[in-house]
């Protein structure tokens, strides 16, 4: 658990301010600030360089830049166009916590996919770092089992994997040992061979060791002539206080510009597309307000429990695991005003504004649940507290539903309902926008008494089977006048029959590119925690018992009562 005390830098860092002032990462700050004064688009295009002489990629980073170009936005002082054009720069990516679940499942496969698609620079190496003792070869064997060739299933796949694995190395060390990071630095330097070096660290570790790692990496293994960036996995604290403390501690060693707080939902294709849908189509934006929208629903469900992650999950629960970050980020993108530009800071500023306009969640507007064991079709599914890493009397919610409100002119009074749960009957994530009734509807007698069922609904299905559909009323062909509801359906697998990149690919690429749009800024994070912290504290202090629901069910009935309090019906349940 990331307790308050656990994230305070350890004794060796207690003189952190003076150390930090001397740290190479901090020294890069004036350079960074200076480079930001360039007008972004024009000077960048002049300074961009090609990673590859061949194999130009189709993939673009989130700001629309071709990925085979890199910006020099926050590079070190030795970076010149000569280095750039002669390909003298290198990229080292160190996955800290390389022996862990996320690294194996997501990070190494995403790095391989980027390599496979020609999106990594010509000169790169990948290091795994963890306490587990492994040889380079053992790391390669471990990760090779999870690498897949997404596109072009057969051609060159094995060769490409071999080539990628040859660039992967391992260094075993403690997370709080400056000496171990100094040794890592030596190995990184060997690979960098005197070239201009950019270094990316991915902290795929439990949050209580984030600060130790950042301290050691900053002091002993940051780049001296290029940039150093750190991707930090969630959870970023467990409430406003611990999150603020974590940010303060990280900022002793890193500038805000070096910290890439990842929320992988922001890298999902349909979440990325939200802004395109809103701001590049005339038909949606005029409807995007309380005048036409009755309610918005943000729904996340998983058809499996916390199996294997109970130890982590029990410290956090579903509100911190999914709602405070993934669903709230989607909400912010959905509800924000039009940003001045697509620049990261303009978008993030709009997101902060909307978050700060929201009313903190009230205990009376949240219901919690926890799954219990259930047998179905002769198979027994375990309850949450059957997990040996979970305390038997745990009150941690594995399901929650919440009603939130935005107190601004656009959204005043519109309920934003969130629902997230584990061990439910299905897996999915979607945004549902339910529109108001048609005033004076000429066809009202053609609908049964339930006019709510006849309103338009826009559904953005983030996963699985990505798609966007708009439920409209339509005349059933024939001589009579019978209406039914049909979908104007944009099904991604039919329209775009290529595989969609994993969110981690997009986000890793963006971090390499220095594109921050899809990462969480510290003020966004503060605003997000401020919305949930009071209710989370009350839930814990009052020891609110979660409503039990059977594994594989549709969740607790409390979710329906909460929705009906605001005259809402969950769209996902109406459909199935
Ligand atoms: N797994 C997932 O699906 C997701 C994970 N995350 C976040 O990503 C990060 C990594 O997740 P995940 O890979 O599942 O985590 P793991 O529990 O697998 O931990 C990763 C590695 O960290 C080391 N480690 C684990 N516990 C400790 C400890 N108490 N003290 C010191 N080192 C420890 C272990 O390496 P070694 O013993 O070799 O040093 C382990 O292999 C976490 O912050 C998690 O919250 C976020 C989204 C999804
Ligand atoms: O961040 C997390 O996300 C996963 C769900 O991610 P998805 O991309 O598979 O939808 C969730 O299982 C996990 O509990 C949470 O920490």
Image (cartoon, helix red, strand yellow):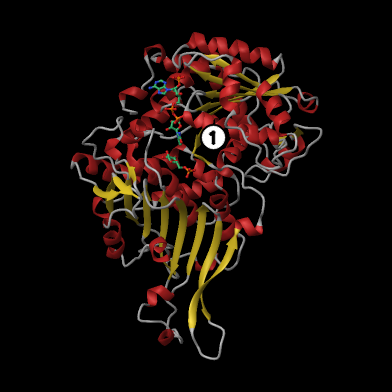
Q: Is the residue 99 above or below the residue 522 in the image? A: above
Viewer-side residue, 141 vs 296: 141
- Which residue is at a point 37% across and 42% down the rendered structure image? 305
In the displayed structure image, the side of residue 307 where residue 253 appears, left or right: right
State the residue at coordinates (68%, 29%).
Answer: 161
- The number of callouts visible is 1
Residue 479 percent coordinates (x, y): 55, 91
Measured as percent of width and height from the top left, residue 290 is found at 42, 66
Judge whether residue 27 can be spotted in this image: no
Residue 42 in the image: state x and y as whole percent. Answer: 73, 42
Q: Is residue 232 left or right of residue 392?
A: right
Q: Is residue 420 visible?
A: yes
Question: Where does ligand 2 appear, by image quarter?
Answer: top left
Q: In this view, does 366 lie to the left or right of 20?
A: left
Image quadrant in which the C terminus is located: bottom left
Instruction: Give me the residue at 60% from left, 27% from top.
Output: 144
Residue 518, image x and y in percent? Answer: 54, 42
Residue at which label 1 appears: 106
Q: What element carries label 1?
A: helix
Q: Which quadrant of the figure has residue 107? A: top right
């Amino acid at each position: 658990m990331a307790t308050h005390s656990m994230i305070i830098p350890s004794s060796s860092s207690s003189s952190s301010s003076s150390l930090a002032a001397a740290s190479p990462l901090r020294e890069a700050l004036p350079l960074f600030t200076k480079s930001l004064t360039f007008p972004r688009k024009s000077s960048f295009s002049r300074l961009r360089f090609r990673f590859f002489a061949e194999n130009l990629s189709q993939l673009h980073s989130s700001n629309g830049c071709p990925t085979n170009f890199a910006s020099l936005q926050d590079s070190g002082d030795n970076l010149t166009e000569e280095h750039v054009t002669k390909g003298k720069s290198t990229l080292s990516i160190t996955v800290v916590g390389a022996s862990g679940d996320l690294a194996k499942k997501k990070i190494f496969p995403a790095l391989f996919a980027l390599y496979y698609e020609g999106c990594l620079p010509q000169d790169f190496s990948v290091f795994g770092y963890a306490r587990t003792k492994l040889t380079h070869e053992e790391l390669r064997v471990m990760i090779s089992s999870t690498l897949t060739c997404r596109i072009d299933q057969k051609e060159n796949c094995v060769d490409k994997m071999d080539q990628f694995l040859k660039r992967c190395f391992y260094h075993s060390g403690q997370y709080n040992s400056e000496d171990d990071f100094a040794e890592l630095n030596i190995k990184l330097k060997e690979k960098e061979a005197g070239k201009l070096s950019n270094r990316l660290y991915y902290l795929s570790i439990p949050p209580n060791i984030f600060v130790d790692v950042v301290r050691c990496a900053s002091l002993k293994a940051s780049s001296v002539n290029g940039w150093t960036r750190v991707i930090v996995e969630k959870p970023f604290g467990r409430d406003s206080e611990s999150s603020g403390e974590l940010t303060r501690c990280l900022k002793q060693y890193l500038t805000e510009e070096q910290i890439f707080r990842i929320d992988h939902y922001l890298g999902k294709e349909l979440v990325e597309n939200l802004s395109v849908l809103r701001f590049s189509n005339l038909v949606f934006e005029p409807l995007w307000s309380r005048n036409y929208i009755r309610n918005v629903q943000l729904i996340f469900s998983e058809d499996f429990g916390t199996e294997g992650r109970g130890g982590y999950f029990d410290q956090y629960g579903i509100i911190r695991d999914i709602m405070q970050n993934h669903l709230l980020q989607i909400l912010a993108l959905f509800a924000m005003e039009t940003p001045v530009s697509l620049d990261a800071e303009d978008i993030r500023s709009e997101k902060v504004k909307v978050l700060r306009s929201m009313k903190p969640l009230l205990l009376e507007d949240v219901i919690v649940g926890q799954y219990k064991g259930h047998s179905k079709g002769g198979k027994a599914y375990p309850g949450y507290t059957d997990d040996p890493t979970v305390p038997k009397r745990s009150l941690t919610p594995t399901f929650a539903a919440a009603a939130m409100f935005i107190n601004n002119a656009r959204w005043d009074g519109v309920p934003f309902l969130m629902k997230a749960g584990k061990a439910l009957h299905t897996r999915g994530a979607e945004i549902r926008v339910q529109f108001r009734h048609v005033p004076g509807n000429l066809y009202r007698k053609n609908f049964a008494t339930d006019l709510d069922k006849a309103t338009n609904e826009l559904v953005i299905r983030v996963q699985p089977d990505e798609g966007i559909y708009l439920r409209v009323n339509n005349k059933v062909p024939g001589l009579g006048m019978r209406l039914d509801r049909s979908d104007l359906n944009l099904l991604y697998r039919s329209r775009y029959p290529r595989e969609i990149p994993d969110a981690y690919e997009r986000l890793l690429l963006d971090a390499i590119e220095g594109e921050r749009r899809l990462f969480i800024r510290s003020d966004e994070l503060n605003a997000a925690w401020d919305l949930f912290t009071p209710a989370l504290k009350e839930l814990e202090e009052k020891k609110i018992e979660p409503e039990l629901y059977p594994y594989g069910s549709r969740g607790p009935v409390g979710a329906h009562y909460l929705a009906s309090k605001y005259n809402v019906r969950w769209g996902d349940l109406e459909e199935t």
